[in-house]
Image: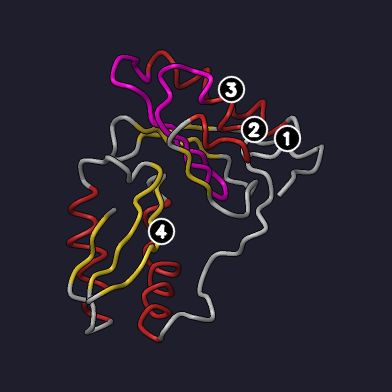
Amino acid sequence: MNQAPNAVHKVSFEPTPNPHTLRFSTHQVFNEFPANFTSAQETTISPLARKLFGFPWCQAVYVGRDFVTVTKADWVQWEIIAEPLANLIEEHLNSGQPAVAPLSESSGTSAGDNAEVQRIKKILDEEIRPMVAQDGGDIVFSRFEHGIVYLHMQGSCAGCPSSTMTLKMGIEARLMEAIPAVKEVVAI
């Protein structure tokens, strides 16, 4: 999604439950489909992520609909880099360049999904993903096999100390309550 040339994005930042990740928010939609980057080699579709991986301390970038999370290395402090990083993200978004190039693939349910997978995806999309997005993360469905739901933890959820609790006490409990065939939820 390209921004209009006169769109003004003011970027603020806040901590997430993951101490190595900050959430940079614009409170305006600038990207239609979320994208996760864990290395510079993956950034070919994202000019913003490519810029951020230009810093040696950058370990991961997640671009959501109206926010970006950046995960840093242990050896650098947020007190030093947070404000300049917010300014860099704001400058990039206000330049009219896309955060992520438009994708041709669609997300969500597919024609081959059985009723259980459709229900799992619906609960994830409508109930769980909006909640974890508030903390700068995302949870993406991978597959459902033999009663086990496999999920990818992204953004601030990846490597977060509280992600196991969120996964087991939140997501797993909700999916098991709604779908009797679900026996376990596993992060991959």
The Cα–Cα distance between marks 4 and 1, rounded to whole angstroms, is: 26 Å
The Cα–Cα distance between marks 3 and 1, rounded to whole angstroms, is: 15 Å
For the point 23% across and 65% down, the residue is 185
Is the residue under label 2 in contact with that under label 3 (CB below 8 Å)? no
Read off the magenta span: 53-78
Callout 4 crowding tier (Cα within 10 Å): few <14, some 14–19, many ≥20: some
Q: Which residue is mark 2?
A: 47
Q: Which x, y percent locates residue 16? A: 34, 39
Question: Could you tell which of marks 2 and 4 lies nearer the N-terminus?
Answer: 2
Is the residue under label 2 in contact with that under label 1 (CB below 8 Å)? yes
Q: Which mark is residue 87?
A: 3
Is the residue under label 1 in contact with that under label 4 (CB below 8 Å)? no
Q: Which residue is mark 1?
A: 97
Q: Residue furthest right?
A: 5
Question: For the residue labelled by badge 1, is the local secondary structure a helix, a strand or a loop?
Answer: loop
Q: Which residue is mark 4?
A: 140
